[in-house]
Amino acid sequence: MIKQPEYTTFIDAFVDFSFKRLFATEESKPILIGLLNHLFRGRKYITAINYGKNEYPGEITTEGGAVFDVICTDADGTKFIIEIQRGYQQNFKDRALFYTSRAISEQVTKGNRREWGYKLTEVYLVAFLEDFNLPDSPKVEYLQDICLANRYTGKIFCEKLSFMFIEMINFVKEPIELHTELDRWLYSLKHLSEFKERPEYLNGPEFDQLFNLARYANLTKEERDMYNTSLKHKWDNKNVMDFAVAQAEQKGERKKAVDMALEMLADHEPVEKIMRYTKLSLEEIEGL
C-alpha cells in the first residue's frame, strides 16, 4: 500500500474512492447539484436528486451489462450518469452509447412493452476524461456538449439523449482566468490534491462542502485505507499506460531509423554514414 504524503491536505478527486465520496453520498448532493447546474448553464435547473442503482445487467444472461460510477435522478425524472475515465479506452464512444442505451432501455419493464407509450425521460452522460482527449476533438476546448441534431442544419432533433465530455487535460486555466463558476469547479477538482490549504477564490457553500469532504484528515482509518488502495490502483494503471506509450514511441523511432537505413543502403551509402545518421549498430544494419 502506498503511503499518503504528509503534505497532502486534500484527496485526489479522480480516483474511485474519492469520486464516489465527492459525488455519490448524501453529504455530497449539494456538490453534485451545483456542478450539474453549472454544466447545463441554465438549460436545466436541478434542485434535488436521488441516487439510483449503478448496475444495469443485460436483458439476457449472455448480454453484457453496464456499471456506472454514479447515477442520479432529478425531480423531473431526468437521469444523469456521472463517469470518470482516467485513460484512453478503445471504442470509448461506443462504450458511452452502450452506457446510455442501458439507462434508456431500462425505462420499460419486460412485461409491459406493448402497453408502453415510448415516452422517455431524459438521459445525460457526464464523463470526466482525466488524462486523454476524445478522438478528433479540438485540443483547445475542454467541454464537448453532444446532442442528437440534424447533420445539415444543426437543428436539435431530440433533447432526450445528450453527452457531456469534460476533457480535463485541456483545462489549463490559471486562477486569474477563472471567470465562471464552472471554471472554478473544474479548477478545484483538477488541482484538489495539490492545495495545501483552501484557496480564498474558491468560496461559497458548495465549496465548503467539497473541501470538507475532501480533507484527508477527515477520513476514518478505514476510509484512508480505501483511498490509498484506490490511489495506488490509479498510479499502477498510469505506470502501465506510460510504459505502453514509451514502448510504442520506441518502436516508431526504430521503424523510422530502419526505413532510413534501407533507403541509404539502396543508394550505396557507406555503412559508417548509415550508422551515424540512424544510430543503428553495425549488426543491425547488416541484418537488414
Image: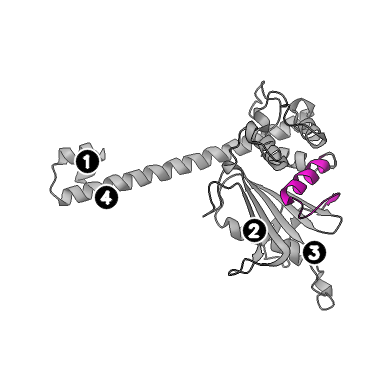
How did the renderer colour the structure? Answer: one colour
Mark closest to the chain's N terminus, 3 or 4: 3
Tell me if mark 4 has few (under 14), some (14-19) or many (20+) residues whose alpha carbon lies within 10 angstroms of its own. Answer: some
Tell me if mark 1 has few (under 14), some (14-19) or many (20+) residues whose alpha carbon lies within 10 angstroms of its own. Answer: few
Q: Is residue 178 above or below residue 118?
A: above
Residue assigned mark 1: 283
Mark closest to the chain's N terminus, 1 or 2: 2
As shown in the figure, which amino acid type bears the numbered disc 4?
A: Asp
Question: What number is the disc on residue 83?
Answer: none
CA distance for labels 4 and 2? 42 Å
As shown in the figure, which amino acid type bears the numbered disc 3?
A: Thr
Q: Position of residue 38 (x, y in %)?
A: 74, 46
* Mark 1 or mark 4, whichever is nearer to me: 4
- Residue 112 falls inside the magenta stretch: no
Q: Secondary structure at mark 1?
A: helix
Residue assigned mark 3: 121
Can the viewer see residue 99 in this picture?
A: yes
Mark closest to the chain's N terminus, 3 or 2: 3
Question: What number is the disc on residue 259?
Answer: 4
Q: Are marks 1 and 3 in contact (CB under 8 Å)?
A: no
Compared across the picture, whether 194 is left or right of 263 comes to: right
CA distance for labels 1 and 3? 66 Å
* Residue lying at 71% horizontally and 39% vertically, measured from the top left: 185
Mark closest to the chain's N terminus, 1 or 4: 4
Q: Which residues are magenta?
A: 28-51
Residue ranking furthest to the top: 6
Q: Secondary structure at mark 2?
A: strand
Q: Secondary structure at mark 4?
A: helix
CA distance for labels 3 and 4? 56 Å
* Residue lying at 59% horizontally and 68% vertically, measured from the top left: 151
Residue ranking furthest to the bottom: 114
